[in-house]
Amino acid sequence: MTASRLRPKVVLWWGIGLTLGGLLLAALMPQLGYALSVQQNASAGVDQGLLSAVSIVVGLTAQVVPPLGVALIGASIVMAYVARLFSETRQAEGAAPVD
């Protein structure tokens, strides 16, 4: 049997990273978009189109990524709990502990 890389600690850190990254993206990207799109010699149509596209992408990302991160944090807690129960059950039966 091959060892899975899907460990509770890894899932927990991915969840924390996605949650914080999504929140920072939602908080900082609109200001960066406004700062980058406002130029002295830029055309108004191109500015507004670019800003609208950035706003839509950031809005969708801000609504998807942080809840996904929170779900991964919850999944890591469940994974750790189930792994602990499984190892206690195996030890009670007299089998070798599972890593």
Image (cartoon, rainbow, N blue to C red):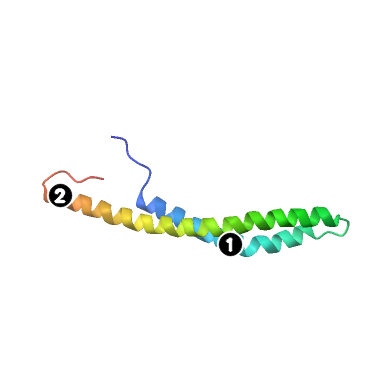
- Quadrant position of the N terminus in the picture: top left
- Which residue shows up at 80% across the image and 60% down it? 38
Whole-percent x, y for residue 24 in the image: 58, 62
Whole-percent x, y for residue 78 in the image: 32, 56
Q: Quadrant of residue 75?
A: bottom left
Q: Earlier in the sequence, mark 2 or mark 1?
A: 1
- Horizontal side of residue 34 vs 74, given as left or right: right
- Which residue shows up at 75% across the image and 62% down it? 35
Query: In 3D space, how far apart are the residues under numbered discs 2 and 1 (Cα atoms)?
Result: 44 Å
Residue under label 1, please give it. 24
Mark 2 vs mark 1, foreground winner is 1
Whole-percent x, y for residue 18 in the image: 50, 56
Q: Residue furthest right?
A: 41
- Which residue shows up at 59% across the image and 56% down it? 60
Identify residue type, mark 1: Leu
Identify residue type, mark 2: Gln
Residue under label 2, please give it. 91
- Quadrant position of the C terminus in the picture: top left
Whole-percent x, y for residue 40 in the image: 87, 60
Looking at the image, which is closer to me, 92 or 54?
A: 54
